[in-house]
Image (cartoon, rainbow, N blue to C red):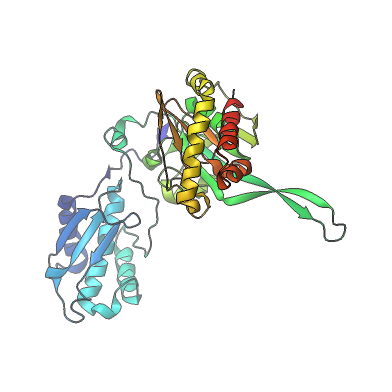
């Protein structure tokens, strides 16, 4: 696979670089008029890449550079060019505060005018919003950053569909129509060897996955976490659904790919693209222990409903995980993934919100019936 930006440096921001950039930009754009301020590389929130802080709440008038600071969020990993762009963005805020004071803070006309001036005389493109997707990768990724680029990249784009009843107003005849739920569309990165596991774990849903083999991309695509068994709904693990390469351009840079095929899921059946064979060894233990798994999971689910019934609604997602050990694996109840039941070598995951029958048993405290239904679903995967 070809890496299109192999010459670019990816990094976490640090104070040493921030000081270099501050001095460089201060001389280049403001003739060293900006007094030195405190610089920090630290956590700044999961949606903030950089921030300028001033004391206007404490001191509504006047200019106090000794009480100002700029923070870059060192939880995120991005290109040096992107961090430089964010740094100069925050320095524009500092300049506006110095020149105009509190009344012109934020991204008002003064900020936009100064940003436009700098954009016109430099390589920067200062905006009033975050332009790209950011990631907090695991150390196992960043510690071996240059070594992972020879790994293949497969992108899966999942669309969940539902069947609704539609009544004709004239004839009152009932039709079945299929619709796509835009809250259940996402994409993920994987490798070809994991596709059979993912397909098998998605059996109890209705929808499809489009599979693409990436031929050319930028380094940033490798920041999308690797899915090996079951896509989750955790925002840091998945990406918005896409239609073509242009949809990914702003967040990941240019991409070229080859379409491998489409896997269609209709309840428990699978059609279309189904390469390779799933692993059977670890599944046999789940099948043998299906009754015990059903009993333990039923007790967890009913207890959870009594304590926190809102966990089962679509507005409260992924807030509870219970992991009772069962031999060499774990039973995990979790709403942060899409399938009803998913199996990996170390855990079996159950998300009952995708089964009306299970939810009815949970709400009515029917532990024995719920346990039997969970066991039945597990055994149906043989």
Residue 128: give x, y in percent of width and height: 37, 65
Image spot of residue 153 (x, y percent): 45, 33
Tell me what residue is drawn at x 23 percent, y 50 percent: 13
Q: How many marks?
A: 0
Quadrant of the rendering where the N terminus is positioned? top left
Q: Position of residue 218 (x, y in %)?
A: 39, 41
Q: Is any atom of residue 323 visible in this view?
A: yes
Q: With 250 as the anchor, is 12 left or right in this view? A: left
Residue 350 appears in the figure: no
- Quadrant in the picture for the C terminus: top right
| Residue in view at x 22 percent, y 71 percent | 95
Residue nearer the viewer, 115 or 100: 100
Extreme residue toward the right, this view: 171
Residue 201 quadrant: top right
| Towards the viewer: 202 or 354 | 354
Pick the residue in front: 19 or 294: 294
Q: Nearer the viewer, residue 57 or 355?
A: 355
Q: Position of residue 94 (x, y in %)?
A: 22, 69
Q: Is residue 227 above or below residue 254?
A: above
Q: Say left or right for 262 vs 214.
A: right
Q: Is residue 208 left or right of residue 10?
A: right
């Amino acid at each position: 696979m070809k890496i299109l930006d192999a010459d670019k440096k990816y990094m976490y921001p640090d104070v040493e670089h921030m000081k270099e950039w501050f001095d460089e930009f201060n001389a280049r754009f403001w003739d060293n008029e900006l007094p030195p301020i405190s610089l920090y590389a630290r956590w700044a929130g999961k949606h903030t890449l950089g921030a300028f802080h001033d004391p206007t709440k404490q001191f509504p008038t006047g200019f106090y550079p000794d009480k100002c600071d700029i923070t870059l969020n060192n939880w995120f990993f991005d290109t040096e060019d992107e961090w430089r762009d964010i740094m100069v963005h925050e320095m524009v805020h500092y300049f506006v505060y110095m020149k105009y004071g509190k009344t012109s803070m934020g991204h008002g006309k003064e900020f936009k005018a100064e940003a436009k001036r700098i954009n016109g005389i430099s390589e920067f493109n200062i905006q009033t919003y975050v332009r790209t997707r950011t990631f907090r990768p695991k150390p196992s990724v960043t510690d071996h950053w240059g070594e992972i680029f020879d790994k293949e990249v497969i992108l899966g784009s999942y669309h969940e569909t539902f069947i609704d009843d539609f009544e004709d107003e004239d004839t009152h005849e009932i039709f079945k129509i299929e619709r796509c739920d835009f809250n259940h569309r996402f994409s993920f990165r994987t490798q070809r060897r994991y596709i059979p596991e993912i397909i098998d774990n998605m059996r109890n849903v209705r929808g499809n996955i489009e599979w693409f083999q990436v031929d050319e991309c930028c380094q940033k695509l490798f920041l999308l976490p690797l899915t090996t068994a079951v896509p989750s709904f955790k925002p840091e693990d998945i990406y918005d659904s896409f239609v073509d390469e242009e949809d990914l351009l702003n967040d990941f840079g240019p991409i070229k790919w080859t379409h491998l095929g489409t896997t269609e899921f209709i309840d428990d059946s699978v059609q279309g693209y189904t390469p390779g064979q799933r692993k059977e060894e670890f599944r046999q233990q789940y099948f043998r222990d299906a009754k015990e798994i059903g009993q333990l999971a039923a007790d967890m689910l009913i207890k959870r409903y009594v304590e926190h019934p809102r966990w089962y609604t679509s507005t409260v997602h992924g807030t509870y995980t219970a992991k009772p050990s069962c031999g060499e694996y774990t039973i995990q109840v979790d709403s942060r993934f899409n399938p009803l039941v998913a199996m990996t070598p170390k855990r079996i995951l159950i998300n009952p919100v995708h089964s009306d029958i299970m939810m009815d048993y949970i709400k009515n405290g029917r532990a024995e019936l719920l346990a039997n239904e969970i066991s039945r679903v597990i055994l149906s995967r043989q």
